[in-house]
Image (cartoon, grey):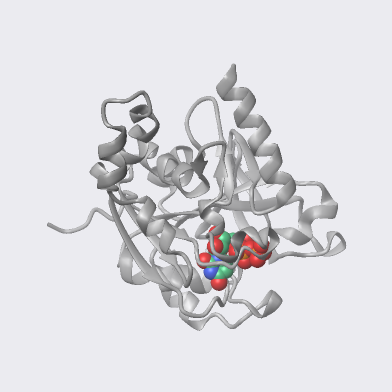
Amino acid sequence: MPIDKTKIRKCLFPAAGYGTRFLPATKAIPKEMLPILTKPLLQYGVEEAREAGISTMAIVTGRGKRAIEDHFDRSYELEHQIDGTSKEILMKEIRDIVKNCTISYTRQVEMKGLGHAILTGQTLIGDEPFAVVLADDLCDNNGESILTQMVKLFETYQCSIVAVEEVPLEETNKYGVVAGEFIADDVMRVTHMVEKPESKDAPSNLAIIGRYILTPDIFDILKETKPGKGGEIQITDALLEQAKQGKVIAYKFKGKRFDCGSVEGFVQATNFFYTKNKG
Ligand code: UTP
């Protein structure tokens, strides 16, 4: 049966980065496996994708990331130990994921940046539009998840979508920053984007966070994309090529995002989810 290219069926998780801001913790443990309370960051991301109706997960890993594969697998001995005890409930969500999702992996051999990690995932995605979740951006919402909001938007616009939020101008140098024209509430047709600009060069204060919907032509563009800021192959540079053809939307999402790739954001997320789960 031909693939329905108007729907998002797969989610890509680039998870090969070194996580140097969390050294020494990330020397042997992948950053994506660091927990907020008792759940690894990557599991939150996979749950968000499932909520958006996606059951095929494609994970780009690298050296030293084997714990990710073990996490999304059965653990017969452990499960046997806790079956029938009060602890069984703690494994409910992960067991459900393992049972109901298809999870595949590929390795990024050289960490040449997010754009390169996404290109590495082409072998798992193929020729169809897909979602991208950077698990170190942890999102929360009271209604629909951010990815669910974006998947719905894709049904209308059928082009690449980046999730954006307003950041203080002095922080634009940590993000890809977009500019363009609003065409609906919270929806901007992107005409310009810059990776990590200093505030004086930033075209706006709308920063891209770790949620994307990408159309598969991005792979051919990425193949031609030269290393940009920091010597890395930047997804922002590839997206700018799509934007020039009017094929990128920026979406001011509803919800909250924590930058768990930084120690400060990680602590904020921990406090937030502790209070939320207690209440
Ligand atoms: P980051 O720049 O936040 O992650 O990349 P990092 O490089 O691991 O972290 P620091 O700065 O050294 O602390 C954003 C996302 O892109 C992935 C990371 O795993 C993270 O999810 N990434 C980045 C790759 O998969 N490959 C890369 O070459 C770079």
Is residue 252 found left or right of 52 in the rendered image?
A: right
Instruction: Assign ligand 1 to one image quadrant.
Output: bottom right
The answer to which image quadrant residue 186 occupies is: top right
The answer to which image quadrant residue 57 occupies is: bottom left
Q: Residue at x 46, y 70 (%)?
A: 62
Across and down, in percent, residue 168 comes to 81, 47
Across and down, in percent, residue 131 comes to 42, 53
In the picture as drawn, the residue positioned furthest to the left comes out as 1
Is residue 6 found left or right of 35 in the rendered image?
A: left
Q: Is residue 130 above or below residue 76?
A: below
Across and down, in percent, residue 197 comes to 77, 65
Q: Residue at x 44, y 66 (%)?
A: 61
The answer to which image quadrant residue 142 occupies is: top right
* Residue 272, visible in the rendered structure: yes
Image quarter (top left, top right, bottom left or bottom right) of the C terminus: top right
In the picture as drawn, the residue positioned furthest to the top comes out as 279
Q: Residue at x 56, y 67 (%)?
A: 17
* Residue 192, visible in the rendered structure: no
* Near-viewer residue (50 or 144): 50
Across and down, in percent, residue 103 comes to 30, 55
